Image (spheres, rainbow, N blue to C red):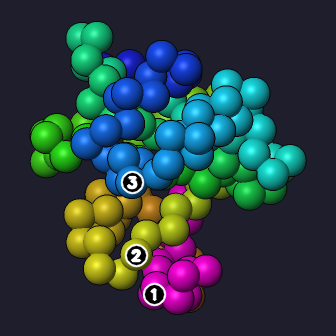
Amino acid sequence: MLCLTPISSGSISELEDTSYAQMSDPDKRRMVRESMDKTHDGAYFEMLAVSDSGTIVGFMNLYARSERTISVGPEIKRRFRRQGYGFSGEMLALDYAREMGYAVAAADVREENAASIALHEKLGFEVGTRCLSKNGNPVRVYIKALTE
């Protein structure tokens, strides 16, 4: 059964096999600590482990862009990709965000990330705008209403 649980300091080793593996150990510890404190740069931030029957298959990051808008970012471990974990995990994360009172979800997706584009479109996100990331990469900013 798939579930989301808050990340803990014991979960740092689980960041391997994800894009977080390239981060320094102090940066990984800082990210986990900020998640446990539920704040990053003065805004709500939480990193949730996506687990299937006790095995962590990836993570969902939630970051408040405003009082009513939450950014949702999936990170599924490479060996668990293309098995539906991104879709199911993000559905759970969107439900969680809705329960917390967020009305809109947003996701920044790099133009070359076809899998993430397909995922967000399957989840009912729409392209709100296209822009360049802080690194100069073209991204699509996807949005989705969480309330009816």
Q: Secondary structure at mark 2?
A: strand
Question: Of discs 2 and 3, which sits in the foreground?
Answer: 3
Front-most of 46 and 1?
46
Residue plotted at (45% across, 28% down): 12
Q: Is residue 146 positioned above or below 11 on the image? A: below
Task: Locate residue 138: give its quadrant.
Answer: bottom left
Label 2 vs label 3: CA separation?
18 Å
The residue under label 2 is 110
Question: Of discs 1 and 3, which sits in the foreground?
Answer: 3
- Is residue 146 located in the magenta-colored stretch of the structure? yes
Q: Is residue 143 positioned above or below 40 on the image? A: below
Q: Secondary structure at mark 3?
A: helix
Residue plotted at (77% across, 38% down): 39
What are the residue bounds of the magenta stretch? 132-147
Compare marks 1 and 2 and give the one earlier in the sequence. 2
The residue under label 1 is 138
Residue 22's disc is: 3
What's the residue type where badge 2 is placed? Arg
Q: Do residues under tags 1 and 3 come within 8 Å of each other at their CB atoms? A: no
Label 1 vs label 3: CA separation?
22 Å
Q: Do residues under tags 1 and 2 come within 8 Å of each other at their CB atoms? A: yes
Compare marks 1 and 3 and give the one earlier in the sequence. 3
